[in-house]
Image (cartoon, coloured by chain):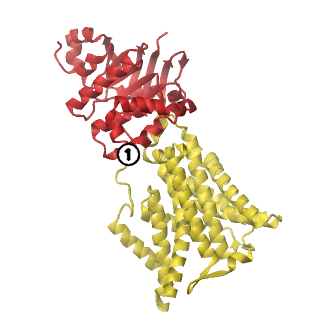
Chain colours: A red, B yellow
Amino acid sequence: MSFFSVEGLSVRYGPIKAVTDVSLRVEQGEIVALLGPNGAGKSSILNACVGLVGKSEGVVRFGERAISGDATEAIVRSGLTLVPEGRRVFPDLTTAENLRLGSACSRQARQEAPRHLAEVFELFPRLLERKSQIAGTLSGGEQQMLAIGRALMSGPKMLLLDEPSLGLAPNIVDQIFDLLVDLRKRGLTLLVVEQNVELALDISDRAYVLANGRIASAGTPLELRAAETIAASFLGHRGA
Amino acid sequence: MEYLIQQLINALALGGTYALLALGLAVVFSILGLINFAHGELMTITGYALFFAVLSGLSFPVAIVIALLTATVCAVLMERVAFRPVRKSSGTIMLLTSFAVSSILHTAFQNFISARPKPIAVPEILSGALSIGFVHVGIIPLMSIVVTWLSLLALVAFLRYSMLGLAMRAAAQDFGVTRLMGINANRVISTSFAISGLLAGIAGLLWLFQRGSVDPMLGFVPVLKAFIAAVLGGMRSLPGAVLGGFVLGGTEVLLRAYLPDSLLGFRDSISLAIVIGLLLVFPNGLLARRQEVR
């Protein structure tokens, strides 16, 4: 049994079917990328995994348990946390308050908050410098660091990241992706939704390519880069 | 000068009551996007709870505690029974639900209690006045000011230092992401209604002490004023609701004190015209949030 799996997931928004019969798996300690053009259904899959989508079919398993149908808060408590698209930090709260909220999910997370906070500040020294600053006034890169740091405060086993490079300067994107590799080294499992295909393939163990709400292809970065047709159709370049 | 100071104290007292009510409306609105027009009925419930508690022979302080508890519990029940089932519906349906709750409670008060005012014997100590220097100040206005500020300080401390308060502030900014923090949405919403009910209870008691009786319409006018105050302050802004309450209360008291007799009948119209003028300058309210995230 895989560490995390999605089986036959379909997501509807009224009459529109955003995701159709998607199945994927992530093994413990892997970085798996979910790639595809705008509107392919990538974010819908992540949102469905954490119970943020009203109507979905299929089964999402995390560890031993099927978590589809569970409330978002219960899913987060079980160790699966989503870093949402566009960072979505709480703009009127300080950096420290945003981080504190990350540990609100359980008594254990609250008890371990000082240790998690020290780890977050070790990963992102910039956040320590900005801890009293109102989050809405942080730069885009700092907000992304805060969004990831906030997710880490719950002590997750697995992170779902929705477009972590969105709207960031190239040097900041490199920093964020280096950090994702670092997180994996620390034992975290990651499922990353990304439009920056090259960067995502550089750091991932495997990837799924999504088109029109369906899995169009899957494989290792090497296999996907070699498949020129797939690369041209879905990855937006002409292969390696 | 003495007259002006007395009027300023009255303005602070009335403004404080409006501020508490507006804050109660804004706490719920900031999280759910619901304007709870049944908020006034929570004031009325407080009044009847106090009336029946005193009638049953309980001491006045105990009756006050029971009245406040009743308002708090009823607000939580209101959310659980009426608003939770329609929470995912449109704002219009939630608004209509709040009118329905208000109407049902109003009719229930009329049919099961009485349409006539029920007098509440306020302890004599509250009807006295204090002399501070050359100014004579009524105990009730003074108490209103003290209670308002203590309530506001307690609320600020709760919102700033407790995890649940922090979660409420976060939920007011982005409810979906608050759930992603593993925070129980129902708990946050129930707490916001409990705080809203408690604030309505405190404001209801202060209002009652001025009037000395409770009737089914007790909360109607104050909640309308509180709504205006909350809009004036910037509907999602809690400090804005407080500021709006004080601005509206202050305007009303000062107009009552200084308008010529021939214009006194237009006091409310002039007061509302001033509010409209302020909203023309600050269309999103005096302390509107700089950015909407929801």
Using the image as rendered, state which of residue B139 and residue B190 is in the foreground. Answer: B139
Horizontal relation, residue A176 to residue B293: left or right: left
Rendered view: B259 above or below B29: below
Res B41 → quadrant: bottom right
Which residue is situated farthest in the right direction here?
A: B57
Q: Position of residue A99 (x, y in %)?
A: 43, 37
Quarter of the figure that contains the C terminus of chain A: top left
**Residue B45 against residue A33 in the figure, above or below:** below
**Residue placed most toward the observer, A8 or A77:** A77
| Tag 1 subunit | A
Q: Is residue B91 above or below residue B16?
A: above
Residue drawn at point x = 42 percent, y = 34 percent: A150
The three-letter amino acid code for the residue at tag 1 is: Ser
In the image, is residue B77 above or below residue B133? above
Q: In which quadrant of the rendered view does residue A181 lie?
A: top left
Identify residue for label 1.
Answer: A132
Seen from the viewer's position, the closer of residues B175 and B110 is: B175
Q: Is residue B95 visible?
A: no
